[in-house]
Image (tube, helix red, strand yellow):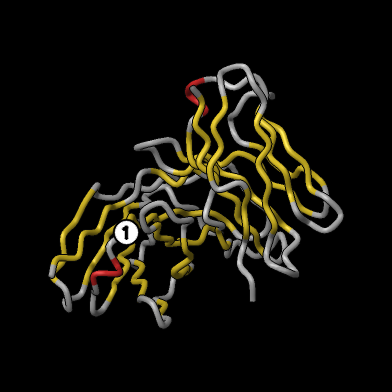
Amino acid sequence: DAKTTQPPSMDCAEGRAANLPCNHSTISGNEYVYWYRQIHSQGPQYIIHGLKNNETNEMASLIITEDRKSSTLILPHATLRDTAVYYCIVRSRGGYQKVTFGTGTKLQVIP
Amino acid sequence: EAGVTQSPTHLIKTRGQQATLRCSPISGHTSVYWYQQALGLGLQFLLWYDEGEERNRGNFPPRFSGRQFPNYSSELNVNALELEDSALYLCASSPWTGNNEQYFGPGTRLTVT
């Protein structure tokens, strides 16, 4: 499995864009980048995923570099409810591999 | 639409006992995944069930086992509990094996004393 590297923590002012980076330099061609978040003591929530094109949904945008070695999750207007741990993982679709989520990035949105 | 449900919410056991955790996937989902999240650590993949069969397991000893029932609900069993088994156990489901958009339940907090 491709491993990912994320900063352990970040702060973001409420109403501003939160940009969460993820490095996945060993990603292979058939692996997607997935983002989940986990609000304290709850199960993780799926946010977005992508292969090589940038993606946007109602929750966030995902920017993947051209070489696919890194990506950025963008929360355009962070709210206090976005305070959570954000996990970036990579895996292929179809079947399931022994993926470890890692420790993620703890995003603290500050009023 | 009801989400993934897990029971119990909290479970307290003593070392050496057995724990049974249950998960009901979203209606229509056939795949169930189990994860362990120990304090301060990330999510560790435990087991994957699909259509009643164990498809893959993570790097956990055999005392972690489970099964999936005909209605796609699942059970995780942990035998000979050890103190380090204390963790949040999360269950996730997805509609089919090719769809990796997993939806997680609230988890079961297992405390081993």
Q: Amino acid at mark 1?
A: Ala
Q: Position of residue B113 (x, y in %)?
A: 49, 22
Give whichever of A43, B14 is nearer the camera. B14
Q: In this picture, is A72 found above or below A10?
A: below
Decide if residue A103 is on the left or right side of residue B5. left
Decide if residue B68 is on the left or right side of residue A81. right
Q: Position of residue A34 (x, y in %)?
A: 46, 61
Q: Residue at x 39, y 77 (%)?
A: A59
Furthest residue to the top?
A: B16
Give whichever of A78, A81 is nearer the camera. A81
How many labels sit on residues? 1
Q: Residue at x 39, y 54 (%)?
A: A87
Chain letter of the residue carrying label 1: A
Q: Position of residue A20 (x, y in %)?
A: 26, 62
Q: Position of residue B84 (x, y in %)?
A: 48, 24
Q: Residue at x 16, y 73 (%)?
A: A14
| Quadrant in which the N terminus of chain B is drawn | bottom right
Label 1 secondary element: strand
Local crowd size for mark 1, using a 10 Å CA cut-off: few (<14), some (14–19), many (≥20): many
Residue marked by disc 1: A84
Q: Residue at x 36, y 62 (%)?
A: A67
Q: In this picture, is A13 found above or below B15?
A: below
